[in-house]
Amino acid sequence: MKRIFAVALLSAASLLSLSAQNLPTPPNYDLSKDGPIPVELTHPGSIFVANGSSDIARFSYTFTGDSSRAYVEFYNAIQASGAYHLVGSPNQADLVLIVRTSSRSMFGYNGGENSASQPCLRLTVVDRRTNIPIWSMIQPIDFAFFHKNRDKAFLRAMQRLVTEFEAFTSVTAKPAASGMKS
């Protein structure tokens, strides 16, 4: 019985190793430690981007714009890359991406008097056919005292989120066509 279990375990490990070799992985992601990346994410097909809004109180006081800013900027970045097939309805999509701003507890008791929170960008990837969230990405927005610097921090966090999404989907932006001739 132990021998059958050992053979089955080795077979499963070799299959996982073979399938892991065929899957693209982003830098600093170790399949053996971090687990497999869903195939739906590595080959996204058609994508619908949804606005998950914001749970940051007084968003316009903290950042320029309103609660749809994360959606607008993420959508524009993905569209500008030219690497994805964006669709106008979730029914036409293979994946639904829900983009939102939120805050997460940094230290102290969550929601208590002595807790502090940090704004962040969240991207939840949902398999449209099953409505199951298959992946989440979170990028913190660095603290800045002045409004202008908070906006810059927001843009840096958005760029990190887009880069992380591109790394997991193994898609990189297509180079922009140059209007100049050599």
Image (spheres, grey):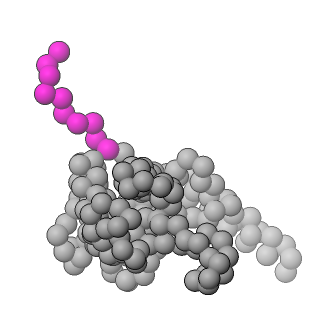
| Secondary structure, magenta segment, majority class | loop
- At 66% from the left and 71% from the top, the residue drawn is 107
In this view of the protein, can residue 124 be seen by the observer? no
- At 24% from the left and 76% from the top, the residue drawn is 90
Viewer-side residue, 60 vs 97? 60
Quadrant in the rendering for residue 173: top left
Quadrant in the rendering for residue 102: bottom left
Percent of width and height locating residue 99: 35, 69
- At 59% from the left and 72% from the top, the residue drawn is 116
Task: Residue 67: say if magenta.
Answer: no
Percent of width and height locating residue 158: 39, 55
Percent of width and height locating residue 181: 14, 19
Vertical relation: 7 (above or below) 169: below
- At 40% from the left and 77% from the top, the residue drawn is 57
Residue furthest toward the top? 182
**Quarter of the image with the C terminus in it:** top left
Please count the marks in the image: 0
Viewer-side residue, 21 vs 51? 51
Percent of width and height locating residue 152: 39, 49
In this view of the protein, can residue 108 be seen by the observer? yes
**Viewed as shown, does residue 104 lie left or right of 157?**
right
**Viewed as shown, does residue 182 lie left or right of 94?**
left
Read off the magenta span.
173-182
Vertical relation: 107 (above or below) 18: below
**Viewed as shown, does residue 126 lie left or right of 2?**
left
Task: Residue 181: say if magenta.
Answer: yes
Quadrant in the rendering for residue 70: bottom left
